[in-house]
Amino acid sequence: MVVARNPPNSQIGTELAQRFLRFRSGSRALGDEAVALREQLEAVTGLPADLSTRRAMFRGVTEAMTNVHKHAYIGPFRDQTPIIPGGWWIGGGFNAERKTLRALVFDQGIGIPVTVPRRFSLEKVFDFFQGRNLPDNDSGRIAAAMELGRTRTGNPHQGRGLPDLKLLADASPGARLRILSLRGEYIYSKVGQEQLQEHPTSLGGTLIQWEIDL
């Protein structure tokens, strides 16, 4: 396999059909970082995003970074992995052969499953598991966070917080949202389908990834 090496100041790397962005990192939720990521993704694909996709990407990435700032680093950690307190990493890539675009946000926080009982009442969390016939595990708690955040507004069509992560998946046919947090994995697609899976080891944080089929 031949790998094209980048000039020292290049923001875009290329490996045959796979093009990828260098990670950007920081410790604050800044809207200009979400805009910069969107602009870099447009540059790597060679295609400008439509208005709805632009708005959805801005809200989704900004919410992911805001979630890091407000909730990810507020308690003790489950493992001994060295962390950068308050840190987040954003990046993305484009597969020219498959016409698939990816954007992602990662943090080393305590994880969505740990923050769910802190953000919502135990009664609501319990009712969610009972109504969906789901076990109280990491993937189930991610699903609970996505649903309870939506219903908290009293308007099923208005997102707040984590449900905003779904907007980018909803903005494009064939798109999907994937969240890995601790041992849990949650996948959401535009058609409203959800997939949950538990893994034997913890990620040691939260990875949020959007995949768009262009």
Image (cartoon, rainbow, N blue to C red):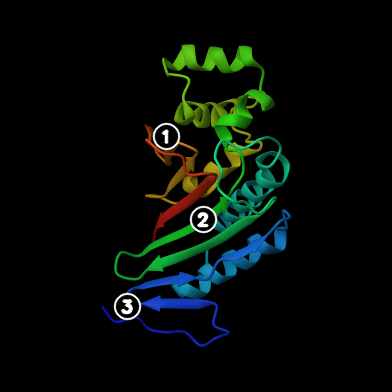
Sequence-first disc among 3 and 2 = 3
User: In which quadrant is the N terminus drawn?
Assistant: bottom left
At 65% from the left and 41% from the top, the residue drawn is 72
Amino acid identity at mark 3 = Leu
Residue 109, percent from left and from top? 62, 43
Distance from label 3 to label 2 (Cα)?
21 Å
At 52% from the left and 44% from the top, the residue drawn is 204
Q: Horizontal placement of 77 versus 96: left or right?
A: right
Name the residue furthest bottom.
Answer: 7
| Tag 3 and tag 2, C-beta contact below 8 Å | no
Residue 53, percent from left and from top? 54, 56
Name the residue furthest front.
Answer: 80
User: Which marked residue is nearer to the observer: mark 1 or mark 3?
Assistant: 3
> Crowding near pointer 1: few (<14 within 10 Å), some, many (20+)?
few
The image quarter containing residue 163 is top right
Residue labelled with disc 2: 104
Label for residue 16?
3
Label for residue 192?
1
The image quarter containing residue 120 is top right
Along the line of sight, which residue is nearer the eye, 173 or 83? 83
Along the line of sight, which residue is nearer the eye, 4 or 177? 4
At 65% from the left and 46% from the top, the residue drawn is 63
> Can I make out residue 18 in this image?
yes
